[in-house]
Amino acid sequence: MRFSISKSLVSSLFLLLALPTLAAAEPISMNEAGQIYRENCAVCHGDRGDGQSRARFGLDPKPRDFSTPGAAAELNRKRMITSVVQGREGTAMIGWLGRLNMAQIEGVVDYIRRSFMQLPPSEEELAVDEPRLQRGREIYEEHCRVCHGDRGNGATWTNSVLNPPPRNFTSPQARRILTRKRMLASVSFGRKETAMMSFSNRLSEEDIESVVDYIRQTFMKGPVVADAGMTDLSGAAAGMGGHTGGGQGASAPHGRAPSSIGSSAMAPRLEQHAQGHAVDMNAPFPGGLVGDFGSGRDIYLRNCSTCHGVRGDGLGPRSHFIQPKPRNFLHVDSRNMLNRPALFRAIGIGKPGTVMPAWSKVLSAQQLADVAEFVYQDFIHPNPDEILESPGLDTMLDKKKAP
């Protein structure tokens, strides 16, 4: 007697047999899961998990937007794991089993759920014993929740209306760049070119500290992740093709950028990675690299000046159509924070959520050092005696206390 077995039945039987074995794999970290998402999923689902990628224009149906309340209500963890394992029939979503192991699949699903989805907070997450944090929770619910959402990952309406959207406190990027000191300054004095207003006239210093600590304890849990995409920027030539410079030496004469600080297109304040320590503006490039000014100038003028401007002021011809605005290298924050390693890293990895690409995919490590050297010499550090001092948070807080 003959009988046939469908491909889907065979696939399901295989999965039933395979899943128990695969699930025993060692769990991966959120750092690793985030990297898997950026390398494999962001091309369709977007850097923010909202489906706003270039690929969406060619896909029907569109990629899933994980940031909507509908997604949180519809997609439980089990269904998402099944979708990643098997793919989704009638969509561009392929099955990833075989390309990723089960631990990686579970990790990237948990990363998506934690970073992008508006899940209702659990009772454990809402439990706050310390009176100061209870006060912080009250302040957050009264003043912050309307924009930043119940779980700190952005309310639905604000993500679609505000540009730039409110900070997603649950993202790995937030854990990496938001120090407590920076958050206190943001709540106290607001953030220029965003909808974040100053609360120094509405809240006391104790209340500001309470709400910041509540946000950090409730929404910013998890490991502080390293910059994405910096997999081979140690100084060895990566063999990546790209534009090469003209070969002039770093000592070649060149014009200096004006020392005055640009008044517009100011980028957000930069934070020191090691809080409380001054940035070493003489720090060398990693891996013993030495940048070539002339080659870097050629690369910059060919690839970077359309956004950042010939003068490095963020006023290139494309800047008028870009949001958020390109970095203004003449701003005091840039000049006090962007040393050679920071420039090398930023150019290499790009900036998610902006038009700044990861140039490590195009340029070699040496070329990255070349363009970073040009930016450093011509814009960041043209004359150390003319660099203005930026008032620190302590100074601003002292002014706030003054009658």
Image (spheres, rainbow, N blue to C red):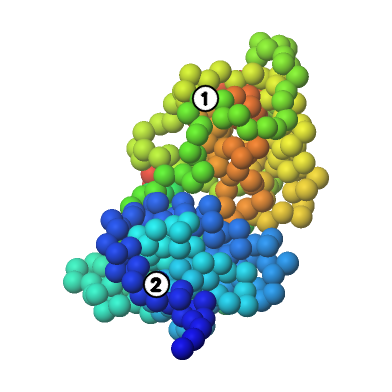
Callout 2 amino acid: Leu
Query: Which residue bears the numbered disc 1?
Result: 236
Assign a secondary structure to mark 1.
Answer: loop
Question: Residue at horizontal 42%, vertical 44%?
Answer: 226
Q: Quadrant of the C terminus?
A: bottom left
List x then y, in percent, for residue 33. 41, 56
Query: Which residue bears the numbered disc 2?
Result: 15
In-image side of 129 versus 26 (left or right): left
Question: Residue at horizontal 41%, vertical 63%?
Answer: 105
Question: Residue at horizontal 45%, vertical 63%?
Answer: 97
List x then y, in percent, for residue 338. 53, 33
Looking at the image, is 10 positioned above or below residue 2? above
Disc nearest the viewer among 2 and 1: 2
In-image side of 206 versus 389 (left or right): left
Callout 1 amino acid: Ala
List x then y, in percent, for residue 238. 57, 30
Q: Nearer the viewer, residue 93 or 118?
A: 93
Give yes or no for contact between labels 2 and 1 (Cβ–Cβ under 8 Å). Answer: no
Residue 332 sits in quarter:
top right
Q: Nearer the viewer, residue 398 or 4?
A: 4
